[in-house]
Amino acid sequence: MSGNTTIKTFVIDGNPVSATESETILDVARQNGVNIPTLCNMSGLTSTGQCRLCMVEIAGSNRLTPSCVTKPEEGMEVVTESPRLLKYRQMILELLFSERNHICAVCVTNGNCELQSMAQRLEVDHVRYEYLHPKFKVDGSHPKFEVDHNRCILCGRCVRVCDEIEGAHTRDLRNRGIQTLVITDFDGPWGESKSCTSCGKCVHVCPTGALAEKGKSVAEMAKRRQFLPYLVMRRKGASK
Amino acid sequence: MLIANRKIAPPDSDRRWKIVDATMRKQGYSPTALIEALHTVQEAFGHVSGEALEFVSESLNVPPSKVYGVATFYNLFNMVPLGEHVFSLCTGTACYVKGSGEVLEFMKTEYGLEPGQTTLDGSLTFMAARCVGACGLAPVMILDGEVVGRLSPDQMKERIREWMSHDE
């Protein structure tokens, strides 16, 4: 950290807090024990503001702001929880549930799933939208892992970890809108990918059961993410 | 960077690959030339084939998944050859409100075409565009490059039937 760091002071939920120049509202909130809901965000990976769960209210603005990609400004007043925010967050989760087949009872990550625990935390007890019930094929061509697009929420964590940490960029998103799908290489079977290093990082950053190790049964797939902070630290050390 | 300078051989002896290569060479084979290169492929071949994606990906050192993602994201690129005639329907918000959804249904029932499909004889391709940027003319359809707007859904259907009978 350089000698003349600018510190900004602002308010989160009525409490005065301070931030360095590089920190986002979400970073500062977490440091101060305010747990803003997120799904696509992952410490160590670039924030993209995709899931929209981390939206917060800022005094003086009618618009909601994604806290993971917004830097605080001096004197800003941030509200992280309100009936309006809860309404929208619940709506986002309901839309996610209705878009693919998130049936916990038969899922490998049941009990270890971020989508599931987020729904519990935000008390989503029903889905008011019609379920689309898409029928995506499960790709089990990889010897160690499998991908079930029916459980994917398109958070893009696997894409980012593969690009930013592993450096292989095996994954990306194809098409757009409702047709969006996570692909490997030229949308081929994962097992035939030439760029995949089979490192398994994508599997372990996946918030749901979309990416899992083979041979796991219902509720057996717990994700291990301890590797990420260490790799990020090493990466930063190397670039200096 | 030595790796970036290696020369990738085109998939076959088709001379059109030279045009694609020229575009990429002009940009110094920079990864940022991706869209430019795909445009050239689209213009030269009429569609973006799998081997074209591979050629561009290797030449520019852009990961395959990224090339595929970009090629499928933009409506300007199509992965399968188009039919002789191309009918595009705008399904953007303004056009949808003005009844383009009805024409979408019409294409399904009358010609059996879903967006992105081509008739079996290869005479007609039906495309649905997100927004062609001419919302003032809503609902907009494009008949072989000719922009037709400000018609009621029924008039649109009539116009399509007329246009379809051109070749007969």
Image (cartoon, rainbow, N blue to C red):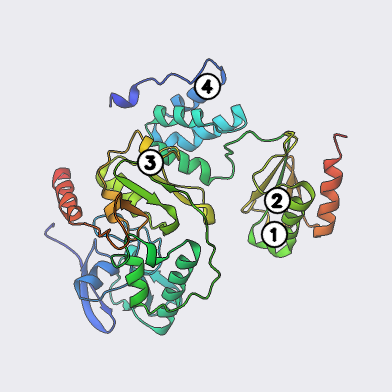
- Residue annotated with mark 2: B89
Mark before the other along the chain sequence, 2 or 1? 2
The answer to whether the residue labelled 3 contacts the one labelled 4, judged by CB atoms less than 8 Å apart, is: no
- Residue A17, given in percent of the width and then of the height, sits at 21, 76
Chain letter of the residue beneath label 3 in the structure image: A
Residue A129 visible within the image: yes
Residue tagged by mark 3? A141
Furthest-left residue in view? A3
Query: How far separated are the C-alphas under marks 1 and 3?
Result: 42 Å
Q: Residue at x 28, y 27 (%)?
A: B1
- Binning the other alpha carbons within 10 Å of mark 2 as few (below 14), some (14 to 19) or many (20 upward) gives many
Give the Cα separation between the discs numbered 4 and 1. Answer: 38 Å
Report the disc number at residue B95. Answer: 1
Three-letter code, disc 4: Trp
Percent coordinates x, y for residue A133 in the rendering: 52, 61
Circle 4: is it few (<14), some (14-19), or many (20+) Cα within 10 Å? many
Type of amino acid at the residue the image marks with label 1: Cys
Q: In this orientation, which residue lies closer to the viewer: B125 or A15?
A: B125
Chain letter, disc 2 residue: B
Q: According to the image, label 4 marks what residue?
A: B17
- Given contact means CB atoms under 8 Å apart, are the residues at marks 2 and 1 in contact? yes
Q: Is residue B29 visible?
A: no
Q: Could you tell me which chain the residue with mark 1 belongs to?
A: B
Determine which quarter of the picture holds residue A154: bottom left
Please check whether the numbered discs 4 and 1 fall on a single chain.
Answer: yes
- Cβ–Cβ under 8 Å for marks 3 and 2: no
